[in-house]
Amino acid sequence: AAAALTIPAAVFTPSALTNADNPCIQTIYSTDPAPMVYDDTVYVYTGRDEDNASNYVMPDWHCYSSKDMQNWTDHGTMLSWDSFSWGNKNTAWASQCIERNGKFYYYVTLECNNGGGRGIGVAVADSPTGPFKDALGKPLCGPSWEYIDPTVFIDDGQAWLMFGNPSCYYVKLNEDMISTSGGIKKFDMNQSTFGPSKNGSSYIEGPWFYKRNDLYYLVFAAFYGNDGSESIGYSTSSSPTGPWKYGGQVMKAGGCYTNHPGVIDFKGHSYLFYHDASLPGGGSFTRSVCVDEFNYGSDGSIPTISPSKT
Ligand code: FUB
């Protein structure tokens, strides 16, 4: 696992530092990691849980970077809920950033202040660390209570945006990255596409979409059977629009009520980012971003990864 940021002594005692490679962010409670590899650097975009929260109290989004997965730089706050005129206070849920033609497009989840549901917003910057500005003054997708957790990927020039709880939706992005075409569609959600469950499929939320060696992957937060909290599962396909084939469990339940995957290859190694409750005072509403390395199987399969800390 990657080494930690330096923890201010006033916040955590030295004993908390020993054996503390994870969580990789230890200066705030951090959530919903979205790694991006750009210019020989890993940028990790995260949400933030407020200290002592007893519900999801999420004011802003942050960014950290590393060139070696050991030493991390804190770039501070990228956006807040009130960077979006249409957003409700402290509803800054999961996000993902991507580069296209030298600009950085940051897709976020935010509850709409018109009461109609949540929306996927998009902010744009000239640098991976901002300053970002809301591109539209309204949601790109939504409002709908199901529209959360955007994941974005550019496949041979065609950008795709996927999102959703409890179903996974997909839509084509135009080259401007701030408009869509063809309408929002829903994947076929069943046990063979997204895993075993008493109802529908095990997919819940937090999709992470990417392509590796000509195989498309959708990694997602999942519920299996009677687990009381979210696991991570994955499916693969030969096309971005499916049909998806369920691949297996990536991480077992147990860290905190939610989990949220972000997968990258960087300098010849593969990494799963996720969140758990492993900082002092941690819990389901005071989460922490972690990362562990893993190896794909020769057939492209993802193994079940044991959190190094949780
Ligand atoms: O962090 C708020 C929400 O909880 C996210 O949008 C979901 O993925 C889950 O992690």
Image: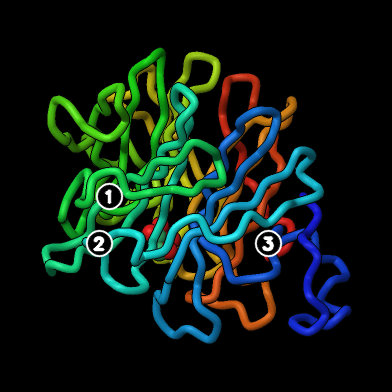
Label 3 residue near ligand 1, CB within 8 Å: no
Label 1 beta carbon within 8 A of ligand 1: no
168 up-or-down from 216: above or below: below
Between discs 1 and 3, the one toward the N terminus:
3
Using the numbered discs, state the Cα–Cα distance from disc 1 to disc 2 in whole angstroms: 13 Å
Q: Please identify the quarter of the rendering in which residue 111 is found.
A: bottom left
Indicate which label's residue lies in the foreground, 1 or 2. Answer: 2
Left or right: residue 194 compared with residue 48 = left
* CB-based contact (under 8 Å), mark 2 and mark 3: no
In three-dimensional space, the C-alpha distance between marks 2 and 3, rounded to whole angstroms, equals 29 Å
Residue 115 versus residue 277: which sits nearer the camera?
115
* Residue 291 in the image, given as x and y percentages of width and height: 67, 50
Residue sitting at 34 percent across and 25 percent down? 159
The residue pinned by badge 1 equals: 120
Residue 85: assigned label: 2
Residue linked to disc 3: 25
- Three-letter code for the amino acid on which mark 3 is drawn: Ile
Decide which of tag 1 and tag 2 comes sooner along the chain.
Answer: 2
Q: Residue at x 56, y 65 (%)?
A: 30
Q: Residues within 10 Å of mark 2 (few under 14, many from 20)?
A: few
Q: Ligand 1 closer than 8 Å to the CB at disc 2?
A: no
Image label count: 3
Amino acid type of the residue that numbered disc 1 sits on in the rendered structure: Ile
Q: What residue is shown at x 79% (from left), y 39% (from top)? A: 68
Q: Evaluate whether residue 196 shows in this view.
A: no
